[in-house]
Amino acid sequence: MATGHTVTVYGAYGHTGRFVVAHLQERGFVPVLSGRDAHKLKALADGYPGLEVRPASVDDPASLDHALAGAAAVINAAGPFATTAAPVIEAALRAGIPYVDVAAEIEANADTFTQFTDRARDAGTAIVPAMAFYGGLGDLLATAAMGDWTEADEAHIAYGLDHWAPTDGTRAAGKVSAERRNGRRVRFTKGQLEYHSDDLPTLRWSFPDPVGQRAVIGEFTMADVVTIPSHLSIPEVRTYMTTEAATGVASPDSPTPTAVDEQGRSAQTFLVDVVVRRGGTERRAVAGGQDIYAVTAPLAVEAVHRLLTGRTRTVGVASAGEMFDAPDFLRALSPHISLEPAP
C-alpha cells in the first residue's frame, strides 16, 4: 500500500481519469482532482468527500503550478495529449516531481521523447509517457518476452478486443492525430516511423485460447511503435487490431462504454498477444483482461508507486519497459490481468 502520498490527477473527471482516481484511493494515495472544467471537477468531488479540487488550464502555467503544489507526482489523464502533455510536463519539471500520462497518441508520445529527454535527465526527474493499455502494456510484455535478448528482428503486438466502444476522449485524440498526419497512416519500419497512404490489409491472427484465430487489421498502428523502439533494438514493430474493434472505434455511431459492474468497467474483453522474433526463434507473452480503459488505472498507479518508492531503472523520459523491471511489474498487475506465460 501507498503511504498517503498526494498525487494530482489532471483530467480527473474523464472516463479514464475516474478509474485512476478510484484506484489511487484504493492503493492508499490521496488524489488531488484537477482539470480544465471546474464544474465537472466539483461534480466528481461530490462522490469523494475530503478530496481537494484544483481547476487548471494548460494555457495558464500558474494554475498548473497550483494544481501540482505539494504533490508527490502527477498523472495526466486529459487528452488530447498533443495539447496537454507538454504544459503538464513543464509544470512537473518546475515542481520537481515525476510525471506519468496515459497517452495513446503516437505523435504526442514521440514529442515527449523528443522535447523532454535531455531536460528530464538533467533534472533527475522521471517522465513516463503512454503508461496505459496502449503503449505501456505492450511495451512491458515485449520487454518481458525479450528476456536476455539484446536485440530482435521483429515485434508484433496483436490486440484481440471483442469490441471497442470509444470514449469521447478517444474520438477527440483520434481526430487530432488524423489532422497531424494529414489523413495518412503511420507504421514503424526499418527503425523509424514512416507515414504512408497504403490501404491496411486484413489478415488472420491466431490468438491463444479462448480467442483463437481472428481477422485483424494489419498495421493498425498504436503507441507501441514509440514505446518499444525507444529502448529495445527492434527495427520492425507492427501492431494489429481485431476487425470488430477497428470498426467500432472508427464508426461515428458506436456508443460510449457502458458500466456492467460495481467498478464501472464495461463488458469489453481483451487479449494482447506479443511475439518477438530473432532469426528462426520466437518468444511470446500474452495478457488478458476486461475493459481497456479500466485496466489503464492500475498500470498508471503502479508506475507512480514504483517511481515514489525508488523501484526504477533510469531517470529522464522512459517507457514502462525501460523504467521498470517488466516481469516484476507484470506480476504486480496480476489482480487485474491474466498472464501467459507467468513472468
Image (tube, helix red, strand yellow):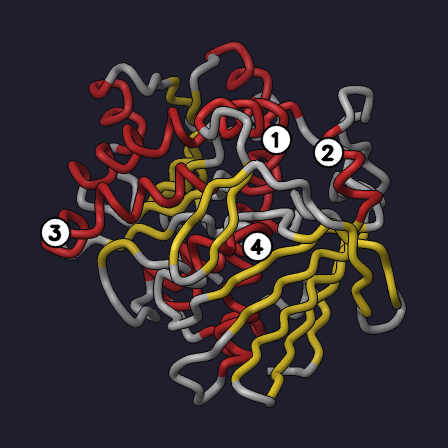
Q: Secondary structure at mark 2?
A: helix
- Give the residue type at disc 1: Thr
**Picture coordinates of residue 9, whole percent (x, y):** 44, 35
Left or right: 250 in relation to 117: right
Which residue sits furthest front? 198
The residue beneath circle 1 is: 170
Q: Secondary structure at mark 1?
A: helix
Real-space Cα separation, disc 1 to disc 3, in angstroms: 32 Å
Real-space Cα separation, disc 3 to disc 2, in angstroms: 39 Å
**Picture coordinates of residue 149, whole percent (x, y):** 44, 86
If you read the primary sequence from the N terminus, does the residue marked by circle 1 or circle 4 appear first?
1
Which residue appears at 76% of the width and 20% of the height? Answer: 252
Marks 1,3: beta carbons within 8 A: no
Residue 298 - label: 4
Marks 1,2: beta carbons within 8 A: yes
Could you say which quadrant of the image residue 228 lies in?
bottom left
- Give the residue type at disc 2: Val
- Give the residue type at disc 4: Pro
**Picture coordinates of residue 136, whole percent (x, y):** 51, 57
Q: Quick check: can you spot residue 11?
A: no
Question: Mark 2, mark 4: which one is toward the viewer?
Answer: 2
The residue beneath circle 3 is: 123
**Is 255 or 27 nearer to us in this picture?**
255
Give the mark count. Answer: 4
